[in-house]
Image (cartoon, rainbow, N blue to C red):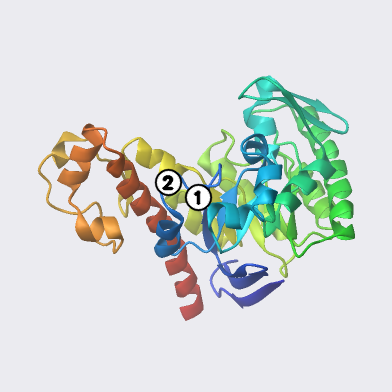
Amino acid sequence: MFELIKKSKNSKARVGKLHTKHGVIETPVFMPVGTQGTVKSLTPDMVSEIGSQIILGNTYHLSLRPGVDLIEEFGGLHSFINWNKPILTDSGGFQVFSLSKVREIKEGGVIFQSHLDGAKIEFTPKSVVDLQRGFGSDIMMPLDICSPYPCDKKQVAADMKITHKWEQDAVDYWQNDKKGQLFFGIVQGGMHKDLREESAKAITGMGFSGYALGGLSVGESKDLMEKYIGYTTDFLPEDKPRYLMGVGLPENLEFAIANGIDMFDCVLPTRLARHGQVFIDSGRQNIRNKKFYNDKKPIDENCNCYTCKNFSRAYIRHLFIANEILAYILMSYHNVYYLVNLVKNIREKIIAE
């Protein structure tokens, strides 16, 4: 259930509470990505200490390794990874986009060639629901087709039509046995206003628990992405949560929240950290830069995270140059903390209006 607590006086921003079987999520919220059942380089205690309310798991990757049977043997993903807060699992739909060279789309689903051993794996609307039931996630996502950018409008429309059929099949299957899990529908339609409107109206008529904007941050410009965020949310109901899939850089969050988005995820905080990049208020900095060689300041003087309270830029640069694992831990901690608290602060400003 989603409670709409407050609407901003100055924008379409909202504050809400999303009730799940593993706790209440205060929105807007940034969700760190734990693709393989772990937020890379951080322990569950660290992720919780940072203030993260929910993490993501990847259905495609977890189904291949370690497999749903083993996860079920441990009582579900929460107990397997020792995380007692909510988990959202995606459907494998993004892998339809990202692994386009090793998959084949059929009317009834997608056949992947495993990136691990080349074995063929079939994902259908119902099998993806079954996998996520086995994981025991709090929020499930349906199988869909994320059209690339750029993409011919005729192809986008064809992808969207299949997606709508798959989503209807999936939501009907979920309705028969909800198991306390929420199920979010995904709006597609590429960079075409009429298709976005058509998709939003179709998906919101299917009875999902919440709605996601898919098919964005797939190579288009920031301006184009913002255009379709602002446009699409107008067609989504106010009494359900809205999730912007795969978007979560600092420069995206304030705009998206002001346009009515409640939930975000992004792999980049930890990925960028592993490449030496850290978030600060004035933008991104690369810790490898020689100017930090003897810099006694923390990564961000305005940040209260463990990393910034205890370590200098010079030390973290040394760790990174020396290929020490601690560098990835400290920078990932900071980057995830930065985004979680950026969204939390925006939430508090909306409440204070």
Q: Do residues under tags 2 and 1 come within 8 Å of each other at their CB atoms? A: yes
Could you tell me which residue is drawn at 42 percent across and 46 percent down? 269
Q: Position of residue 213 (x, y in %)?
A: 67, 49
For the question of whether residue 342 can be seen, the reply is no
Q: Quadrant of residue 139?
A: bottom right
Location of mark 1 (residue):
248
Q: Mark number for residue 269?
A: 2
Could you tell me which residue is drawn at 61 percent across and 78 percent down? 5
Using the image as rendered, state which of residue 28 and residue 52 is in the foreground: 52
Q: Which residue type does callout 1 highlight?
A: Gly
C-alpha distance separating marks 2 and 1:
9 Å
Q: Secondary structure at mark 1?
A: loop
Q: Which residue type does callout 2 highlight?
A: Pro
Q: Position of residue 199 (x, y in %)?
A: 79, 47
- Compared with 133, 345 (above or below) is below
Residue 275 falls left or right of residue 288:
right
Residue farthest left in this picture: 294
Mark nearest the camera among 2 and 1 is: 2
Q: Quadrant of residue 291?
A: top left
